Amino acid sequence: MKVIFVACGSGVASSETAAYKLKKLLDEKKLKADVKAVNFRSLKSIASQCDILVHIAPNDPTDYGVPTVNGVPFLTGIGLDPVMKEIEELLEE
Amino acid sequence: MESSNNQLKLLILPDFVEVGLEATDKESAIHSLAALLFDKKYVKDTYIDAVLTREKSFPTGLRTLDVHVAIPHCDVGHCNKPGIAVGVLSSPVEFTEMATLDQFVDTKIIFLLAITEPEQQVVWLARLVNLFQTPGFLVSLSEAENSETGYQILTEAFRKEVESEN
C-alpha cells in the first residue's frame, strides 16, 4: 500500500485536518493508501518513507524527491478536484 | 449525537464569538480573540505569543469562494482545553495566505483554535472545514447582526454537519 504524508507547520491542525479529509475521500473512491499527518520540521529525514507528499507549508524550495501536491485545497475545497485526480493517478502508478 | 452537542457547547462558548470585531491588523485581532479564550482559562498565558510566532512562519489565511477566513493556532502545550474563538471583523484584515509567504488574503472571519489533542479534535476541524465549503455559511456568518446571532449561526451549522454524518 502506498504511503502519503501530509505536512504542515506543526502537525496540530492543518495537516491533521487535510489528512482526515484525504482519508475520507480515498475511502469514498475505494482507494487504499496509508495517510499520515507529519510535522514539516521532520520532513527532511522522513520524506523518503512516503510515496506522495501533500504539502501545506510555505513555499519550500526543497525537492524531497517524491511527487508533491498542494494540500491547501483540502481545507478550502477550492481546486480540490484536480489535486485528488493527481493523487489518484499517482496511486495507480 | 447528544455527546456531540455537549462537546460543541464546551468547544465554542457563547463568549467566544465576537461579531463586529474591531482590529487594525491581524495581530490585534488575534490578541482580542485570544483574550476570550484566556479569560475562561482555555489557554495559558504563553498561548498568544505562540500563535503570533507560528503565524509568521506558517500563515493560516484561507481563500474560500466568497468570504475569506484564517485559522490561527499553535502547538498543544499552550492550551488547557480545546476551544474555538470566532471573530467576525468589522473590516477585513490582511493575513498571509497558507502555504505562501507573499500572497495575502483579506480575512473577514478568524477562527482562533485551541487544540489539546489533535487526533481527538480533528473531527471538529474537519467539520469546520466542511462549513467553509458549505454554500452560504460564511456569508451568513459574516452578515450576523451581533455576537448572539453569530453564535446561533455557528452552533446550528455545526449541529447540521454532525447530523449529516449519521
Image: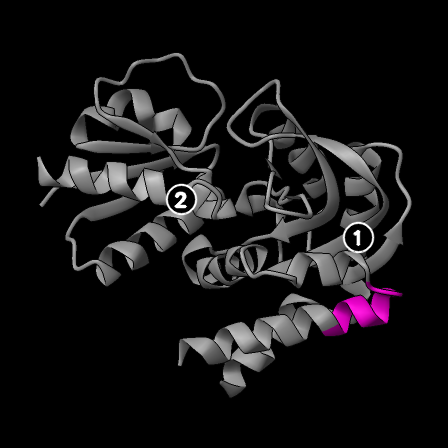
The main secondary structure of the magenta stretch is helix
- For the image, the number of numbered tags is 2
The residue at 75%/74% (across/down) is B152
The x and y percentages for residue B70 are 65, 42
* Residue A50 or residue A74, whichever sits in front: A74
**Left or right: residue A27 compared with residue B149:** left
Which segment is the magenta one?
Answer: B144-152
Q: Which residue is mark 1?
A: B88
Vertical position of residue A59 compared to residue B118: above or below: above
The residue at 65%/62% (across/down) is B136
Which quadrant of the rendered structure holds the C terminus of chain B? bottom left
User: Is residue B28 shown to the viewer in this render?
Assistant: yes
Q: Secondary structure at mark 1?
A: strand
Q: Which residue is mark 2?
A: A80
Vertical position of residue B39 compared to residue B155: above or below: above
User: Is residue B41 shown to the viewer in this render?
Assistant: no
Residue kind at label 1, given as amino acid type: Val
CA neighbours of label 1 inside 10 A, class few (<14), some (14 to 19), many (20+): many
**Left or right: residue A67 compared with residue A83:** left
Q: Secondary structure at mark 2?
A: helix
Vertical position of residue A22 compared to residue B160: above or below: above
Vertical position of residue B130 compared to residue B66: above or below: below
